[in-house]
Amino acid sequence: MGSYQQIMDAAAVAAFLDTAFPKDTRPVYGRVSTVAPGYAEMRLDPTEAMLRPGRRVSGPTLMGLADVVAYAVVIAHVGPVAMAVTNTLTMNFLRACEMRMIVAEARLLKLGRRLAVVDVRIWQDSEDRPVAQATVGYALP
């Protein structure tokens, strides 16, 4: 996963996210489950409000999860920087996402002084069958 130096653990990242996002919106973005060098993982239990017709988890829900897990891996390695902002997000929807637990894994591809690039894989049941993949870029202050 690269030779990235992790600064914050999972509990510290979760606590920071709780302060960086409005309290009412935090459950929508999932919970931090793992942080390791170059890596972060979040899990989301979808609600009825996250579904689109056909009882599939909506694209905007998955995009939000991808963005937040990418943010989590970046801040775990640069520290609690509230002003890091998404500058790109390319999302590929690969399979239908059912209403059950969703896992989002973020891996740092590049972490520079001004830009970070993150690969995100979102899956259910088996990481070998992703429901979505995203590449997310962050501009760092």
Image: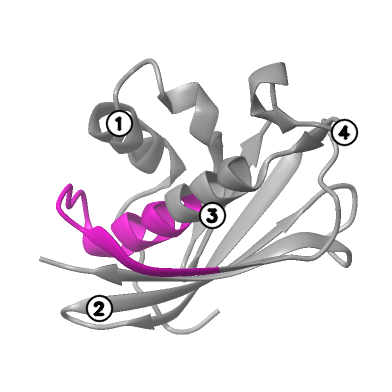
Sequence-first disc among 4 and 3: 4
Give above or below for 131 relative to 20: below
Of helix, strand and loop, which one carries label 2?
Answer: strand
Q: Which image quadrant: the N terminus?
A: bottom right
What's the mark number on residue 54? Answer: 4
- Residue at mark 4 to residue at mark 1: CA–CA distance: 30 Å
| Residue 56 spot, x, y in % from top left | 81, 37
Q: Is residue 82 visible?
A: yes
Is 82 inside the magenta-drawn segment? yes
Sequence-first disc among 3 and 1: 1
| Residue at the (51%, 23%) spot, across then down | 27
Q: Which image quadrant: the C terminus?
A: bottom left
| Residue at the (64%, 20%) spot, across then down | 49
Residue 66 found in image quarter: bottom right
Q: Is residue 34 visible?
A: no
- Residue at mark 2 to residue at mark 3: CA–CA distance: 17 Å
Please, what is the three-letter code of the amino acid marked with disc 3?
Ala
| Residue 57 spot, x, y in % from top left | 74, 38
Sequence-first disc among 4 and 2: 4
Give the residue pinned by disc 1: 21
Mark 2: few/some/many CA within 10 Å (<14, 14-19, 20+): some
- Residue at mark 4 to residue at mark 2: CA–CA distance: 38 Å
Label 1 near label 4: C-beta < 8 Å?
no
Residue 137 found in image quarter: bottom left
Of helix, strand and loop, which one carries label 3?
Answer: helix
